[in-house]
Image (cartoon, helix red, strand yellow):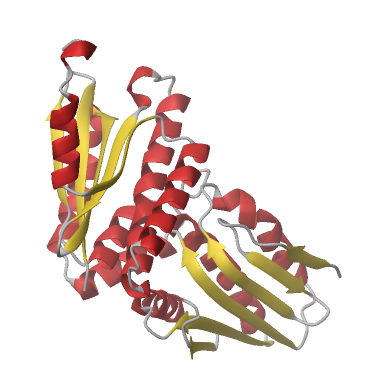
């Protein structure tokens, strides 16, 4: 599709109907992450959202965006430049805030991530609490402190099952999408 | 021994560690991308302190937000405190949470379950 054929009205309508508050495609750098968090904090403030929901949305946003950031960092360290960008959107409807993230992932990493999310989705509140404590208390962590706790934390705070998809791109890459719903109670 | 005093930012907490007074405080937000780097000097000072701690050590944790990457570093601090306590010294951790912040209350309870140190949950009114 050439740029001139891009139907911007169609884009606008889609964003409008999903009440998209912020949308981004590109490299999630530390600066970008900070800016996005600032924008969202102001937006949530301006909407007059209650502190309970505001805190949950902000917390989940931090984990989502930092997941994208650490993932990009890891891809860069492996010398992968082209596929290090990501997409992120947050919108809202009458009952919830909705976040979607998308990024390339090495195909050989799919099964591990998939089984972690399936495990998280299979657990109830107490099960998630136990898993969180177990992962928190083990000594595994990456050099910057990432530890696989993010996904568990997102599930605990949103109190919803995580919806995800892995789309095969080619032999090397898969495209991972994660949909998160945070109820506005 | 020395003092640590770090002013808070939108991503990192205000940290005070006064080893002469046996007092440590963490307040504000702890959501840095690289939490290991941020917590390293604090963990190191506490490690140094543990060689000759005061008879009583008090730790005040009053966080608005913290990310999962900080949660491991906070556990590192607590484990050092656990060792100080195990060696026969008095240690108290006060964990503050705002009245409607169930997530912060639960986070405190998670640590309380892992660490064998007197741990008090303190509810504060919303600002």
Left or right: A97 as drawn, with respect to A76: left
Quarter of the view holding residue B78 = bottom right
Residue A6 appears at what percent x and percent y? 18, 19
Left or right: A158 as drawn, with respect to B21: left
The number of numbered discs placed on residues in the rendered structure image is 0
Q: Residue at x 54, y 52 (%)?
A: B32
Residue A22 appears at what percent x and percent y? 32, 44
Q: Residue at x 41, y 30 (%)?
A: A27
- Residue B124 seen anywhere in this rendered image of the structure: yes
Residue A153 appears at what percent x and percent y? 32, 61
Say above or below: A29 vs A131. Answer: above
Quarter of the view holding residue A9 = top left
- Residue placed farthest to the right in the image? B1
Left or right: B75 as drawn, with respect to A69: right
Say above or below: A180 vs B101. Answer: above
Q: Nearer the viewer, residue A176 or B52?
A: A176
- Residue A146 seen anywhere in this rendered image of the structure: no
- Residue placed farthest to the front in the image? A9
Q: Residue at x 55, y 55 (%)?
A: B11
The quadrant of the rendering that contains the N terminus of chain B is bottom right
Say above or below: A2 vs B64. Answer: above
Quarter of the view holding residue B53 = bottom right
Left or right: A91 as drawn, with respect to B94: left
Q: Residue at x 40, y 28 (%)?
A: A75
Q: Nearer the viewer, residue A92 or A162?
A: A92
């Amino acid at each position: 599709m050439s740029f001139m054929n891009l139907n911007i009205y169609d884009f606008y309508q889609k964003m409008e109907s999903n009440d998209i508050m912020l949308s981004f495609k590109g490299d999630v750098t530390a600066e970008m992450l900070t800016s996005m968090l600032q924008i969202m904090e102001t937006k949530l403030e301006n909407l007059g959202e209650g502190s309970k929901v505001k805190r949950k949305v902000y917390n989940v946003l931090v984990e989502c965006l930092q997941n994208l950031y650490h993932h990009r960092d890891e891809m860069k360290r492996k010398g992968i430049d082209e596929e290090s960008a990501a997409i992120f959107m947050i919108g809202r409807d009458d009952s919830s805030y909705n976040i979607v993230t998308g990024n390339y992932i090495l195909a050989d990493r799919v099964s591990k991530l998939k089984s972690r999310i399936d495990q998280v989705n299979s657990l109830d509140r107490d099960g998630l609490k136990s898993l969180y404590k177990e992962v928190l208390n083990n000594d595994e962590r990456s050099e910057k402190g990432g530890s696989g706790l993010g996904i568990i934390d997102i599930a605990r705070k949103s109190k919803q099952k995580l919806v995800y998809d892995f789309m095969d791109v080619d032999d090397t890459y898969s495209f991972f999408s994660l949909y998160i719903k945070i109820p506005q109670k | 021994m020395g003092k640590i005093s770090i002013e808070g930012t939108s991503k990192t907490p205000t940290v005070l560690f006064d080893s002469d007074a046996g007092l440590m405080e963490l307040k504000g937000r702890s959501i840095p991308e690289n939490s290991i780097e941020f917590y390293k000097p604090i963990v190191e000072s506490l490690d140094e302190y543990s060689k000759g701690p005061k008879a009583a050590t008090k730790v005040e944790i009053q966080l608005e937000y913290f990310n999962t990457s900080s949660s491991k570093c906070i556990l590192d601090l607590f484990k050092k405190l656990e060792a100080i306590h195990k060696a026969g010294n008095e240690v108290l951790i006060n964990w503050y949470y705002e009245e409607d912040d169930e997530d912060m209350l639960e986070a405190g309870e998670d640590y309380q379950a892992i660490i064998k140190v007197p741990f008090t949950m303190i509810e504060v009114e919303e600002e």
